[in-house]
Every structure is written in structure tokens, then in C-alpha cells.
Image (cartoon, coloured by chain):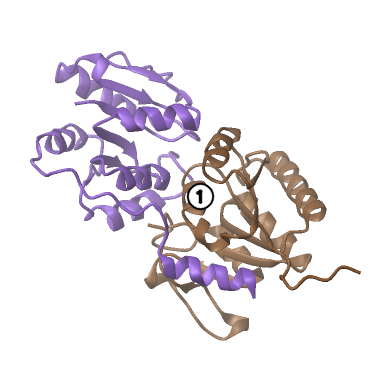
Chain colours: A purple, B brown
Amino acid sequence: MKLFLTVGSQLPFDRLTVAMDTWVDERNVPSRQVFGQIGPLGTGNYRPAAFSWTRLMDPKSFNTRFAQASHIVAHAGMGTIISALVSGKPIVLLPRKGALRETRNDHQLATIRHFRNRAGVWVAETEDELPEVIDEMLGSDDVAPARANMLADPDLTDAIREAILT
Amino acid sequence: MEHSSEPRRKTVLAIASQGGHWVQLRRMREAWAGCHVIYVTTQEGYRAEIMATEPDAEFLTVPDASRWDRLRLIRSAIEIAWILLRRRPDAVVTTGAAPGYFAIRIGHLLGMRAVWVDSIANCDELSMSGEKAGPHSDLWLTQWPHLAQPGPRLRRGPRYRGATI
């Protein structure tokens, strides 16, 4: 088991970072099995103690960590969700909330409603739910979810192509 | 005088900010297969990915800016305008956010084809930049059927033609 935590690069997301740190500590998970990309430090300057982490990653090291991981824990950002679906890796999502100034609006709440039924996608609506949802993901007997296509719907690209070329 | 039976190869400027917008833009690359493509984004680290998968493509970066940071927004807009004026692409395609908005508005003014594909992250309502850029686009798409508002050209909203995932 290797877990990769990623919260995106724009804003801190301490609710997720702290909950993950607590989970790793309470479950006695060896720190080498977890790596986190935690974004800019939040107002409390929280730094995880139970696993190694970095603030930002360039795309190459991000892809390497992603490829090495067996499971992902993340904010509900589309880039991360697409990466998980394409690589067929189970993922736990905790949505950022606009009211807490974790993002500009509540679009991540909408995102989890629309993606939570996909195979391999697990959702924690709040940080309190996160430990159980991670346990559930790790304990699930599901075979790895099917890998999504590398490319968009052909209907979509055909429509764009027509607009470009005519 | 030069004569050619082959139509001139079109140039497409494909632009998106880093993260989910970029990932979605790249998934649409079949749309400009065979065209000359200029990728514009806000993350230099994506260059290696382009060089590995589309070595013929060009790759440029502009400053990242959200709508909270006015100075950087202006700098980003100026750089995008400069790229469009210098390179004169036939079409601009974007998934957002701020850099895509500027590219659509300026490209539209310059008579280029403009395509806005609203990010799939906007599942309850269209993005703010999409609402503003959409009416200036030749093709305005949402990735959610329930957000499509096809209608007469002057009062139209986005259409739905499938999704990037």
C-alpha cells in the first residue's frame, strides 16, 4: 500500500492535511508508505509530522508519485480526479468549501455529487468522515477500477474540429 | 507565383491554465490533429510532456493569474494579446480559466475562430469566465447536458457535445 495525498497548488487545504496526518498517526502507518503534496502552508503553518511531504511539485515529480501510489487521497480537483480515473487508481475526495475560503466557490461540492458514483471514487464529505472512508477504500475487495480513456469523447473533439476547420 | 493544391495548414492556439483546465485541454488534442498547434499555459513544467507526445507543437507560457490579482491579470492579458498578434492563429481553443478568457476575447476581435469548452468541474453552473467568454465564441460548449441552453444565436447558451472524461 502506498498513499499519495495531493491538495492542488493554489491554496492550502489544512482540513485535509491535518486529517491525513492524524489518520497516518492513529493507524500507525509507516511514514514511507505515505507522501503528501500539501500546497502553500495555511494560516496555522501546519506541517505534517507522520509522513513526508512537499508544498508544490513540478508535473514530472507529480506524475512519478502518482504512478508509484496504489491509492490517492485528494481535494476534489478535476486534474487529480481525471488522473485517478485514467490510471485506474482508487481515490478518496474531500471537497474544498467556498464558505471556508478554501476555494473561490462551492464547485468542488458539485464535483463530488457528479463523480461519487464512478467506480474507484470514494467521497468524504467532511474531514470527520475521512479516516473511515480511507479505511473503507483500503479494505475494499474491488478489483482496480477500469482505466478511463486517454482522450475526450470523439463527439466533442469532432465538434471542435469542425469549428476550427470550417 | 506559388501554386499549391493543398490547403494551407491551419494554426490552432490551445490555451489553458495549469491543473484541471490543462488536463482537459490536452485530452481534446484529436480536435487539432494535423494542424499546427501552439500550446499556451501557466506552468513551464508541462513542456516536457508536450515535447514527448507532440514534438511538432510549440509551447509557450504566460503568467498565472486569478481574478483576485489585477496586476498579474493585466500582464497576462498583454502577453496573450502579443502572442495572438504575432502568431495570428486561425483558431483559439480553451477550457479556461482567465488566460482562456483573454484569448477568446482578443482572438474574437482579431477575427479568429474561438472555441470555449467549459471545464467539467462546473457541474452545477457555468464558470464565470465561461459566461462572459461564451457569447464571443463561435462554439461554446458545456460538458454537462443539464447545463446546455441551445437557442437562437443572439440569446444562446452553451451546447453539449460530450465531455473530456
Label 1 element class: helix
Residue A119, how many percent across, how many down? Answer: 20, 51
**Residue A160 can be seen in this image:** yes
Residue B46, how many percent across, how many down? Answer: 55, 37
**Residue A15 can be seen in this image:** no
Q: Report the front residue among B78 and B82.
A: B82
Amino acid found under the numbered disc labelled 1: His
Residue A84, how many percent across, how many down? Answer: 32, 43
Q: Report the front residue among B2 and A104.
A: B2
Residue A29, how many percent across, how many down? Answer: 18, 18
- Residue name at image x 18 percent, y 31 percent: A131
Q: Report the front residue among B130 and A156.
A: A156
**Alpha-carbon neighbours of circle 1 within 10 Å: few (<14), some, or many (≥20)?**
many
- Residue name at image x 45 percent, y 23 percent: A55
- Residue name at image x 25 percent, y 44 percent: A125
Above or below for A116 versus A3: below
Above or below for B41 versus A30: below
Identify the subunit bearing mark 1.
B
- The residue at which mark 1 appears reads as B21
> Is B154 positioned to the left or the right of A52 in the image?
right
| Quadrant where the image shows the N terminus of chain B | bottom right
- Residue name at image x 78 percent, y 58 percent: B88
> Is B90 positioned to the left or the right of B93 in the image?
right
